[in-house]
Structures are given as structure tokens and as C-alpha cells.
Image (cartoon, helix red, strand yellow):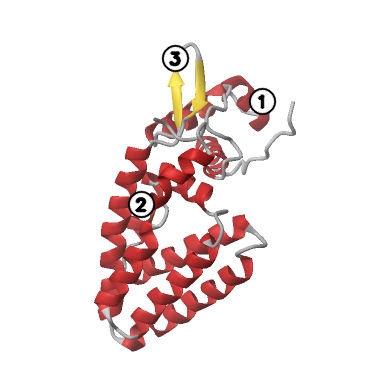
Amino acid sequence: MKTPHKLDRTRQAAPQVFEWLRGSILSLQLAPGTALSRAELADRFELSQTPVRDALLQLAQEGLVDIFPQHATLVSRIDIPSATQAHFLRCAIELEVVRTLALAAAEDTAVLRAKLAAQIDLQAALAIADTEEFISSDQAFHRLMYEAAGAPDLYELVRRRSGHLDRLRRLDLPSPGKAERVVRDHRAIVAALAARDPDAAQAAMRTHLSGTLGRIADIRVRHPDYVAG
């Protein structure tokens, strides 16, 4: 049996199991098609099966696992329609976020721009060396803008709806030049915010968000077992 995964016993178990499994699925440590045994997971987390069941049900609601009653629970393959809908949602919200920030008073966004620039510098340093930290910094970049626009709850909404899209993006990230394009796009977004140009900010964000969906055919060829259909 694998080494038990220690939980914070001051917090409820099911949300922690859910977050661990979700993170493992999005990072592709648990690849599409991987079987998830409720009993084995309960042993790993040193829990009863009830919180594990609850975590798996929540993952199923996000479409990240397929539950076949009395048979098996499998990590789902990446569903392109779900990824496309998540992209529509994210694009609609983030275009409004950057427009709001571009129209804000310069002094109100000066601290934000400094924080965004720091994340970009970190991303540039991590582009080749550390994929996981690069992705974390990318997420932090976007979360900062949601928070500055007064919409932190919408960031969580998008995050919860983006499991299929996030897995596609992870498969696309190793493509030659992809990480560098992400950094370049982020610089363009910040430059437009600094210029207080909402149209340029939206154009830069639209370009930034469109990359992965435009490469679905290539991703499907390289990872046929990961993508449904």
C-alpha cells in the first residue's frame, strides 16, 4: 500500500480528498482512464469510505470522473465540448475584467500592475525549468486581476468549471514556444492596462485565451487516449 496521505485533522476530510484528487487529475498524475478504488483511497487517506465517496461524487459533478455503479470509477477523458464551454465562460468574464481594470484610475491599479509584472518575471524564469510552478504563477496572474476587479468569487466559479480546459492547456504547454507565448501575452495585457486602453486590453486577453483551443487537433493526435471523441 502507498504511504498514507496525511490530512489536516482540524478540517473536514471530504474537501481535502477532493482537492487532492482534483489536483492530481488536473496535473495528469492521474491520467484519463485511471481507475479510482474507493477502498484503496480510504486506506491511503486513513479514512472511512464515506468522505472518499463524497469527494468522488463532487469530482463527478465537475465531469472529472465517470462513476459506473457497482463497477468502477474512472478518471474521465477530456471532453472537448466541456472545455469549449469553459473557454466561453472564462473569455466572457476575463474580457470584462481587463476592461474594468483598464478604465480604472491609474493610481488605483499601480500596485496591481507591479504585482502582475512580478508574476510575469517569475513565469519567464520558470518557463523551461518548472512546469508546475509556471502553471501556479499563471493562475496567480489571472487571480490577481479578478480580485482587483472585485470579482474573486468569479475566479472560483471559472476554476471549478475549467477542469477539462485546464487539462488541455497542460497537454499543450510543452509545445515548442508555448510557455514563451504565455509570457508574451501577459506582458501585452499589462502594457494595455498601463496605457488605460480597454480595447487593447481585451484584444490581448482574447489572443491569450484562444491559443489552446486552436491546437485541439494537434493535441488529439499527440494524446489520443486522453481526449474523448
Q: Nearest the camera: 71 or 204?
A: 204
Q: Which of the two discs, 2 and 1, labels the residue nearer the N terminus?
A: 1
Task: Say which element carries label 3.
Answer: loop
Instruction: Identify the disc placed on residue 158.
Output: 2
Residue type, numbered disc 2: Val
Distance from the alpha carbon under mark 2 to that under mark 1:
32 Å
Label 1 crowd bin: few (<14), some (14–19), many (20+), radius 10 Å: some
For image coordinates 46% across by 45% down, the residue present is 218
Return the residue found at the far bottom.
Answer: 107
Q: Position of residue 200 (x, y in %)?
A: 29, 76
For image coordinates 39% across by 81% down, the residue present is 191
Q: Nearest the camera: 141 or 3?
A: 141
Task: Say which element carries label 1.
Answer: helix
Residue type, numbered disc 3: Pro
For image coordinates 29% across by 85% down, the residue present is 105
Residue type, numbered disc 1: Asp
Give the answer, above or below, for where 145 lies relative to 155: below
Q: Position of residue 182 (x, y in %)?
A: 48, 65
Q: Which of the two discs, 3 and 1, labels the residue nearer the N terminus?
A: 1
Name the residue carrying label 1: 43
Label 2 crowd bin: few (<14), some (14–19), many (20+), radius 10 Å: some
Give the answer, above or below, for where 211 lies relative to 181: above
For image coordinates 61% across by 26% down, the residue present is 42
Instruction: Identify the disc placed on residue 69.
Output: 3
Q: Which of the two discs, 3 and 2, labels the residue nearer the N terminus?
A: 3
Instruction: Identify the disc placed on residue 183.
Output: none
Q: Position of residue 100 (x, y in %)?
A: 26, 73
Return the residue found at the far top.
Answer: 70
| Location of the N terminus (image quadrant) | top right
Give the answer, above or below, for where 150 lies relative to 22: below
Give the answer, above or below, for where 140 lies relative to 172: below
